[in-house]
Image (cartoon, rainbow, N blue to C red):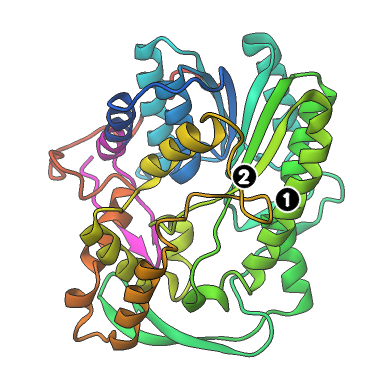
Amino acid sequence: MIIQPKTRGFICTTAHPEGCARQVRRQVDYVKTQPAISGPKNVLVVGASTGYGLASRIVASFAAGANTIGVYFDKAAEGSRTASAGWYNSAAFEQAAQAEGVKSFSIVGDAFSDAIKQQTIDLIRSELGQVDLIVYSVASPRRTHPVTGETFSSVIKPIGPTYSNKTVNFHTAEVSVATIEPATEDEVRQTIAVMGGEDWQMWIDALSEAGVLSEGATTVAYSYIGPEITHAVYREGTIGRAKDDLEATAARLREQLSAIGGRAFVSVNKALVTQSSSAIPVVPLYISALYKVMKERGIHEGCIEQMYRLFSSRLYGEGEAAVDSRGRIRVDDLEMQDDVQAEVAEIWDKLSTENINELTDIAGYRREFFQLFGFETDDIDYEAEVDPNVEIPNLR
């Protein structure tokens, strides 16, 4: 079939297998040009098929030579429907890992469930013995609690007064004002239940109780802080409450894992184009301005560059990992430089539909959004027939 992008708001409902594979290969090729990392040997990535989770898996395998297990919730092609981008990404990763001679296995299912945790533990026992790095990179709008059965739904809302600020339809480059009503107490509770640290804690508890954590094991989860422009809808809103919970979980896990010489971190990463960030009002417009500033200064990083830097200079560099006053690793340091933020703020004040293409990199944002799904990728013939049915080599 000929596969073209079909969008619904901030979601692309189709994905291109060859384009996704090319994007994965680009990340693999980047890592293979960098110095090797003396790092983890057996890695579990929970949320492994896109974004920072996928990039973490690539860095672990191709910079550190690690064996990996990836857990993710993605769908194969069915009838006229393509597979999800994460499915195609994972198939390409598995093929590349096989060629490299490192072990890699995939488990597809609900990472929040006890059944998937147990399946993962069984696979670790049979194939790896133990794991020495657990990356928690789950991004989901809903979660069903494995004990109570309650299903929670997250929301992206401010806490307190109604919030208004500039936003953009990145498909049309139209700048408008978004107004968001504040969250209720129950919406805050549910967002924390989905995006906070409880499931991360459950994973580490299950792995620990099963005896599949190695001595000195490290775990890391990912977060974002961002600038004052986005705070009301992000860091000081419902998502921010969930991230506070994630950071509190990291502190508990640090104490828990100290018994085996282990470590637990939250890594605060840079703002990037992801399906999740595309859903947050204000954020795509901010990222478009940020990209222009950072690219002009030669300090822009994508997911793979961020994760290589995290692994090589923070998690597995010489000496102790540098952290801020709250124990967080900060690889958003280039984004949050005072001069970068001052220039972004200056652009923000001037932004309108009429000048957005001049003042921001909205075209780059749009291109990266479609590349998440395998489109707008160089050297791919999108008018050619392609088989949407792709097998993941080591799917368990």
Residue 49 makes an appearance in the image = no
**Label 2: which secondary element:** strand
Residue type of the residue flagged with mark 1: Gly
Residue type of the residue flagged with mark 2: Ala
Tags 2 and 1 touching, CB below 8 Å? yes
| Count of numbered circles on the image | 2
Work out whether 381 lies above or below 212: below
The residue pinned by badge 2 equals 221
Horizontally, residue 139 falls left or right of residue 371, namely right
Answer few, some or many: residues within 10 Å of disc 1's Cα (few below 14, many 20 plus, some between 14 and 19): many
Residue at image x 24%, y 53%?
298
The stretch in magenta equals: 1-23
Q: Quadrant of residue 295?
A: bottom left
233 or 326, which is in the foreground? 326
How far across and how far down the image is residue 393, in percent?
44, 18
- Distance CA(mark 2)–CA(mark 1): 9 Å
Residue at image x 67%, y 10%?
126
249 or 338, which is in the foreground? 338
The residue pinned by badge 1 equals 197
**Label 1: which secondary element:** loop
